[in-house]
C-alpha cells in the first residue's frame, strides 16, 4: 500500500477522533514491535549467511578506510 492508497482509505473511512488515535496507536505499536537495533540485525545476518555477511563487513571497512583519500583526490582534481 502506498501513501496515495492509504490517504484514499483514510478519507473513505473518516474515523472519529477517538478511533483515529486508536488506529495511530496500533500502527505505531506495530512499527515499534518490528524495530530492532542495528547490531542485532548484523548478528542475525551473520547467523543466516556468514560468508556474505563477512564480505559486507569487509567492504564496509574498506570503504571507511578508502573514502578519505578518494575525497582528497577528487578535491585535488577540481
Image (spheres, grey):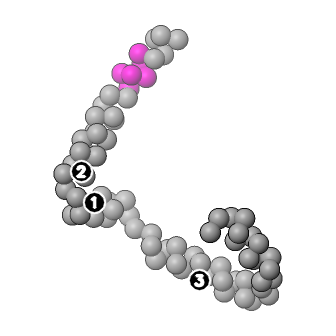
Residue at mark 2 to residue at mark 3: CA–CA distance: 36 Å
Residue visible at 37% across and 59% down in the picture: 38
Q: How far from the left and from the top, in percent, is residue 78?
A: 52, 11
Single out the mark in the foreground, 3 or 1.
1
Q: Is residue 6 left or right of residue 57?
A: right
Which residue is drawn at the image coordinates 74% and 70% (left, top)? 7
Rounded to the nearest whole Å, what is the CA distance between mark 1 and mark 2? 9 Å
Residue at horizontal 46%, vertical 77%? 33
Whichever of labels 2 and 3 marks the residue nearer the N terminus, that label is 3
The residue that disc 1 covers is 45
Q: Chief secondary structure of the magenta span?
A: helix
Asked whether residue 17 is in view, the answer is no
The percent position of residue 3, horizontal first and vertical second, equals 68, 64
**Label pair 1/2, CB-CB below 8 angstroms:** yes
Circle 2 packing at 10 Å, graded few (<14), some (14-19), many (20+), is few
Compared with residue 21, is residue 46 higher up or lower down, i.e. above or below?
Answer: above
- Give the foreground label among 2 and 3: 2
Element carrying mark 3: helix
Q: Which residue is mark 2?
A: 52
Q: Are marks 2 and 3 in contact (CB under 8 Å)?
A: no
Mark 2: which secondary structure? Answer: helix
**Quick one: label 3, few (<14), some, or many (20+) residues within 10 Å?**
few
Q: Earlier in the sequence, mark 3 or mark 1?
A: 3
Q: Is residue 16 above or below residue 63?
A: below
Magenta residue span: 68-73
Callout 1: SS: helix
Image quadrant occupied by the N terminus = bottom right
Report the mark closest to the observer, 1 or 2: 2
Q: Nearer the viewer, residue 55 or 77?
A: 55
- Residue that carries the numbered disc 3 in the rendered image: 26
Amino acid at each position: 500500500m502506498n501513501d496515495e492508497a492509504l490517504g484514499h482509505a483514510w478519507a473513505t473511512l473518516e474515523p472519529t477522533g477517538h478511533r483515529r488515535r486508536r488506529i495511530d496507536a496500533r500502527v505505531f505499536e506495530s512499527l515499534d514491535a518490528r524495530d530492532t537495533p542495528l547490531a542485532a540485525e548484523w548478528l542475525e545476518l551473520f547467523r543466516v549467511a556468514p560468508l556474505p555477511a563477512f564480505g559486507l563487513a569487509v567492504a564496509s571497512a574498506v570503504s571507511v578506510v578508502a573514502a578519505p583519500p578518494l575525497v582528497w583526490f577528487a578535491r585535488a582534481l577540481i
